[in-house]
Image: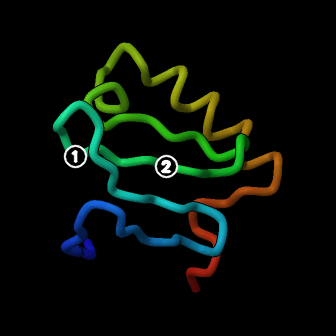
Amino acid sequence: MLVLGRREGEGIVIADTIKVKVIKQDGMLRLAIDAPKEIPVIRTEIYQEPDNLKERQQLFIESYTKGFSPNRGEK
């Protein structure tokens, strides 16, 4: 796991397609995520719920068949 410190207005780019920026909204720091529609972006507390397993599997299958591979670049 990579841990980075970011301030308001700063961000990161992942694999040239996903942009994450720290913004301030209503006095709170939040993450603004810009990703292609075929890449599912799910909050961890939702992702980890056992009831969502079938939905996660379907999202993975749909995104993988559209050309996105979560292991892209790994050897």
Q: Residues within 10 Å of mark 2 (few under 14, many from 20)?
A: some
- Residue 69 drawn above or below residue 61: below
Q: Residue at x 81, y 56 (%)?
A: 67
- Residue 71 drawn above or below residue 43: below
In the rendered structure, the answer to whether residue 39 lies left or right of residue 45 reads right
Q: Which residue is mark 1?
A: 29
- Residue 2 drawn above or below residue 29: below
User: Which callout, 1 or 2, points to the residue nearer the camera?
Assistant: 1
Q: Residue at x 63, y 28 (%)?
A: 58
Furthest toward the top, the residue is: 51
Q: Which residue is mark 2?
A: 33
Q: Residue at x 44, y 24 (%)?
A: 53
Taking depth in this image into account, of 59 and 43 the one nearest to the observer is 43
**Where residue 31 sits in the image (x, y, percent)?**
35, 48
Q: Residue at x 62, y 33 (%)?
A: 59
In the rendered structure, the answer to whether residue 67 lies left or right of residue 53 reads right
Taking depth in this image into account, of 43 and 68 the one nearest to the observer is 43
**Where residue 69 sits in the image (x, y, percent)?**
67, 60
Inspect the image, locate mark 2, and give the three-letter code of the amino acid beneath it.
Ile
